[in-house]
Image (cartoon, rainbow, N blue to C red):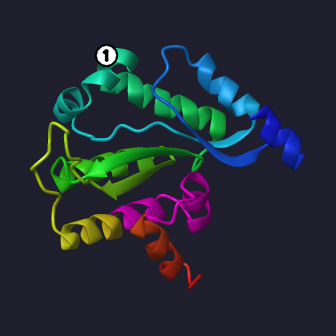
Amino acid sequence: AEAIKDSLGVEKFNGTAVIGAPKDFDTIDKYAEAGFRTIGTNLEVWDEGYFKVICPGKVSECGTRDHWLETLDYEVSKFGRGRVRCGFVAGIEPKERTLEGVEYLAKRGIISLTGAWNPNPGSALEGHRTPKPEWHFDMAVKTHRILANNGITFDLYADASPSASFIVHDIFRIEEGLI
């Protein structure tokens, strides 16, 4: 971070620190002080039961889902509304559960990414399939609506998630008349 700031001659830069939920929130302070403009802490799934089963390493290394939620709230206090993101792997749990998480977080100023689940060869879920494209498109439309209704704009979304691989980017751009 120091090298980036020195090279660009800025105090804050377009870079998202993606971290696990630290036991000591001073870690989050250090990322903010280092110049990162945004931060990401990915729950992967919203439902607490799924979280324990799908993310056992996150639970054992970083704590319970409640700790992850406390982390996200603390990140908003340090980085600001629209400067914190949380990734969900859409398609592992029922759509309604993921959208419940998107809504919960959006009300707190947290941007949710709802990228399509793709089971990896060799993973414990190899052989399962992601939902159909229509399911994922509906997820993207509903994610955009929730975020927009909670004050998230394309600029905030793109700053916290500059990769244009999420269809929500395009929905924001269309809805805001940017394309």
| Quarter of the view holding residue 34 | top right
- Say whether residue 100 is left or right of residue 153: left
| Foreground residue among 36 and 70 | 36
The vertical placement of 106 against 31, above or below, is: below
Q: Position of residue 17 (x, y in %)?
A: 59, 38
Q: Position of residue 84 (x, y in %)?
A: 54, 43
Residue receiving disc 1: 60
Q: Residue at x 59, y 81 (%)?
A: 178
| Foreground residue among 18 and 72 | 18
Magenta-tinted stretch: 143-165
On-image quarter of the N terminus: top right
Q: Is residue 10 visible?
A: no
| Secondary structure character of the magenta stretch overall | helix
Q: Position of residue 132 (x, y in %)?
A: 16, 68
Q: Residue at x 49, y 81 (%)?
A: 174
155 in magenta: yes
